[in-house]
Amino acid sequence: MDHIRPEPPRRPPHVLIIGAGLGGLCLAQGLTTAGIGVTVFERDDSPRTTGQGYRISLKPDGTRALRECLPEHLFGLCLAASLRQATRLTALDHRLNPLFGKPLPRLDETAYFGINRLTLREILLTGLDGAVRFGAAFQRLERLGDGRIRARFADGTHADGDLLVGADGTGSAVRPFVAPGAAFDELGTLLYGRTLVGEDVPGWVPEALVDAFATLTGPDGVSMTVATCRTRGPLPAGLTEIPGYLAWTISTGSAGSTGPADSAGSMGGRPGGTRPPDGSGGADRPERLDPAGLRRLALDLIRDRPAAVRRLVEEGEAPFPVRLRSARPVEPWHVPGVTLLGDAIHTMSPGRGEGANVALRDAGLLRHALVFTARHGVPLETAVAEYESAMLRHGFAAVAASRERPFLRRPRTP
């Protein structure tokens, strides 16, 4: 933004962030360290109301944003709490016969590392106690006479600020006020699960699945991925200790429908074209099943895998379903005082593991824009427009790339 003619410095903006996910909290940390006022509003009642999933893989875009936004000691905490790197990439058939494999090189552990999602969220919440309000479900916004924005919440309260940032994920309640025509494609559903194994992976786990990123693909097209997740050592004090585990996903193949991004969508058809586990004829979508039903579905999908692979599901935690959505590109908007970041605008499939990295990159870019406003007199509307132009460009490039992974294709019906 060096080409923008500055104005005399103004009062630093106060920023309202809707959503306490990774992107929203990273932005809040960055603004706090820069001395810019920020309040985060999260609809969940507490940080643990919703499960935080399992591991995420951070790459240079994500780690760069964390390094720029976090105080040095918190970025160091991320590194100290990171997971051991995998040693190989493996593709197997449904009987564990190798199809492809290669060793993975050691990467710069300050730029590439895995970390438990819960751990990263706990780190991102550190020091923000007075700036994060839980139990605040955003409902609507209003524009005040002085140009500021008023956010109204379901409990009857409100908050005023100079900029409102929708960082509230794929089901964003802010997005309809900014990009009401935004839409997505439904790519199917993955079942996510994990099996606790502790520090030493038990001997019954196939060696091909240990310390690897492994994908098992069956003749019906149903795929299962397995990743070993063990921290380098005990987690630093104050973070929830997480034992070693094998994280796994199973594709159900439910897919194909499209719809507006603010609708519930549709997941018609039997999961993955497989026989339903309960004889129901496939009427229930994965997200409508209870934990026992989800486990039965997972076992049915991998019924032709070896007993040791099925044991991962039998002895693991009950899986949970994640609907895969891919946002369609949107035209730039011109809505002063409101913007979006992360999955709230460019939700993508997990095919390349880029979603969290792109959201963190958004947070770093928006922080940079707002620092220019606070310190160099760049008009807020101009700075945010510059951010949006860059965010839409790199965000939707990542969306397009994420759709290329083959395991997201709909399995063939037997």
Image (cartoon, rainbow, N blue to C red):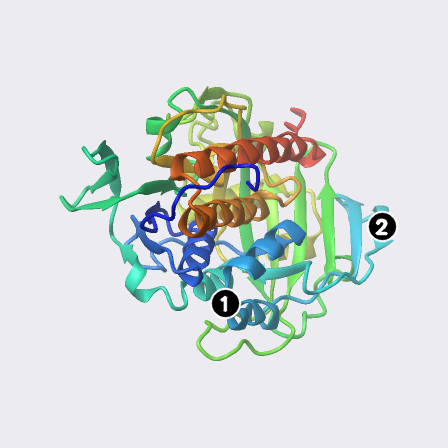
* Residue 33, image x, y percentages: 44, 62
Mark 1 nearby-residue class (10 Å; few <14, some 14–19, many ≥20): some
Above-or-below relation of 358 to 34:
above
Q: Quadrant of the N terminus?
A: top right
* Residue 188, image x, y percentages: 55, 31
* Residue 230, image x, y percentages: 63, 68
Judging depth in this view, the residue of 205 and 365 nearest the camera is 365
The amino acid pointed to by label 2 is Gly
Q: Quadrant of the C terminus?
A: top right
The residue drawn where x is 64% and y is 66% is 83
Badge 2 marks a residue whose secondary structure is: strand
Q: Does any portion of residue 290 appear in the rendered image?
A: yes
Judging depth in this view, the residue of 341 and 405 nearest the camera is 341
Q: Residue furthest left?
A: 156
Instruction: Indicate which label's residue lies in the foreground, 2 or 1.
Output: 1
Judging depth in this view, the residue of 52 and 128 nearest the camera is 128
The residue drawn where x is 37% and y is 41% is 165
Task: Give residue 71's mark.
Answer: 1
Above-or-below relation of 361 to 146:
below
Mark 2 nearby-residue class (10 Å; few <14, some 14–19, many ≥20): some
Q: Residue furthest front?
A: 8
The residue drawn where x is 33% and y is 54% is 38
Q: Are marks 2 and 1 in contact (CB under 8 Å)?
A: no
The residue drawn where x is 61% and y is 67% is 82
Between the residue at mark 2 and the residue at mark 1, the CA separation in whole angstroms equals: 39 Å
Badge 1 marks a residue whose secondary structure is: loop
Q: Earlier in the sequence, mark 2 or mark 1?
A: 1
* Residue 70, image x, y percentages: 50, 63
- Label 2 sits on residue: 101
